[in-house]
Image: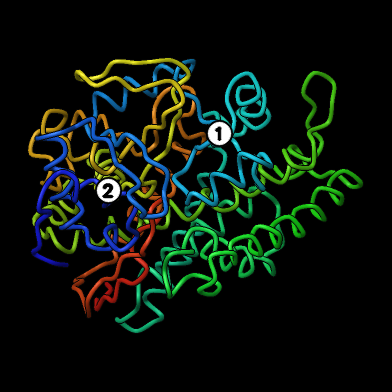
Amino acid sequence: MSNREPANVEEAGYVFVDPAAYADEDYFHRACAMLRREDPVHWVESHGVGFNSFWAITKSADIFEIEARNQIFLNEPRPVLGSIEDDARNGATGGMLRTLIHVDDPEHRELRGVTQEWFLPKNLAKLEDMLATYAKRYVDKMADLGGRCDFARDIAMFLPLNVILSILGLPESDYGRMLKLTQELFGGADEDMRRDSDPAAIIAVIQDFFEYFTKLTEERRANPTTDMASVVANARINGEELTMMQTIGYYVITATAGHDTTASAMAGGLHALIEHPDQLQRLRDDPSLMNTAVDEMIRWVTPVKHFMRTATEDYSLRGKTIRAGQSVLLSYPSGNRDEEAFVDPFAFDVGRSPNKHLAFGFGVHYCLGAMLARMELKAFFKELLPRLDHIELAGDPKLMKTIFVGGLKSLPVAYSMR
């Protein structure tokens, strides 16, 4: 982490296009605090940095306002910040991927309905035994590792992966492949995660996803089972099968975001407990705080760093006019540290209530898997804390370089178990 400060709001605005800035959390949060204070609706001019210009939205209330107006601010054609070349390619071809985050109503509502029942509380409750089993497996693994591990790499990335791929119905022999592809998809800007340094490598990653999930779709249509992959493969909207692009997009967003974000929250949550031993002790002393503690971990980490929306008409916000056709970047980490939305937002508080964070989004695009993510974190920490005697850092934690989704890529810890 660095002690540097942005020189002005213009420099602060460029944190959103700089993957290295997200890996330097202190600098990133200082830049966002400057923007919230001095220019909360800030125009980020491209100036040759390789991205089309956009408005950066850094206040919680403004993000909620835009998310609530999904008829004015659309996901298409630019749901995620990409390079000028990416924007041009997606505009010309409709993009290589069309997932739930890429589409708007009515298509979004119809696609969401395909698996919505899977994520209802009554159905997720049936997974509690499975989650408890996985939690015990990975806490046992921590014990077997003899008191030292890289928690991010050895534990956190695997538990959520097992959960979501079990729900999808993928064979365990393919879990490693899904993990590698996910890291390459979200870590394209990080030298430790990407496939190679060629920006076009991401296209090859997406093609690998297409190849895998095309075969899966064909198999589940020929021989349907009771797993979620079969539900998606055989779903119908208005009497028509989903297109291959729709099924593959569904699988990709479920198999990647369905575990990577939870893994980031799990590793970042443990890091926060280590850095705030008073809060760790508080949670030990009062396990009834687990629900609020998990939400605080998710707010603290905010694994999804942004989504983009494009205005369909002129819209006034804090005295600025967002013109039709212009894009806004909704900065969730900034909104989740907003001094007007949270009491002492830079304090990690396992009992924080209320905690109206934005880590799962808001409105029609609210994360389908939000409850499942919370359940996974609760299951793991419920298993870990009674068995954990002591834990401390055993090296420097490292954050992934990214502008979209990410968290800790390394968390070396030393510990003793009861």
Q: Is residue 288 visible?
A: no
Considering every residue shown, the one lying at the far front of the view is 47
Position of residue 158 in the picture relative to residue 299 (left or right): right
Camera sees residue 104: yes
The residue at 39%/58% (across/down) is 402
Q: Could you tell me how far apart the alpha carbons at marks 1 and 2 are, in whole angstroms?
A: 32 Å
Disc 1 packing (10 Å; few <14; some 14–19; many ≥20): some
Position of residue 87 measured from the top left corner of the image (x, y, whole percent): 54, 44
> Tag 2: residue type?
Met
The residue beneath circle 1 is: 77
User: Mark 1 and 2 residues: CB-CB less than 8 Å, in contact?
Assistant: no
Q: How many marks?
A: 2
Indicate left or right for 406 with 299 as reference. Answer: right
Give the residue at x 25% y 38%.
292
* Residue where numbered disc 2 is placed: 297
72 vs 410, left or right, is right
Q: Nearer the viewer, residue 59 or 167?
A: 59
User: Where is residue 411, by image quadrant?
Assistant: bottom left
Residue 316, disc: none
Check the image and name the residue furthest to the bottom: 146
Q: Is residue 315 above or below residue 326?
A: above
Q: Amino acid at mark 1?
A: Pro
Residue 6 placed where, x, y %? 12, 54
Kindly report which numbered mark, 1 or 2, lies closer to the viewer in this rendering. 1
319 is higher (above) or lower (below) than 331: above
Which residue is located at x 26 percent, y 24 percent?
62
How crowded is the residue under tag 2: few (<14 C-alpha within 10 Å), some, or many (20+)? Answer: many
Between 119 and 254, which is closer to the camera in this rendering?
254
Query: Which element is circle 1 on?
Result: loop
Q: Secondary structure at mark 2?
A: helix
